[in-house]
Image: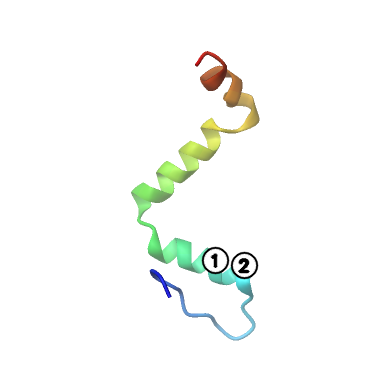
Amino acid sequence: RYGHRAKLGKGDGIVDMYEKTRAEGFGSEVQRRVMVGTYVLSAGFYDAYYNRA
């Protein structure tokens, strides 16, 4: 497989694996950049940032 994959506990599903893998694998700076990017690309800010371009 590619990259880091978190260990699953008993009863954990695929969504739990994604959440744990991303929490363990991405540093705090990467997580911050993902959240800022998601915020900027949300519907309310899309027009302000991309319609001018």
The image shows residue 4 at horizontal and vertical percentages of 39, 70
Q: Nearer the viewer, residue 51 or 23?
A: 51
Which secondary structure lies at badge 2? helix
Please report the residue visible at 53 percent of the width from the left and 80 percent of the height from the top.
Answer: 8
Q: How far is the residue under mark 2 from the one under mark 1?
A: 5 Å
> What residue would you read off at disc 1?
18
Q: Is residue 6 left or right of residue 11?
A: left
Please report the residue visible at 55 percent of the width from the left and 83 percent of the height from the top.
Answer: 9
The furthest residue to the top: 52
Q: Is residue 34 left or right of residue 16?
A: left
Please report the residue visible at 39 percent of the width from the left and 58 percent of the height from the top.
Answer: 26
Mark 2 and mark 1 residues within 8 Å of each other at the beta carbon: yes
> What residue would you read off at disc 2?
15
- Report the colour scheme: rainbow
Residue 5: image quadrant is bottom left
Please report the residue visible at 53 percent of the width from the left and 21 percent of the height from the top.
Answer: 50
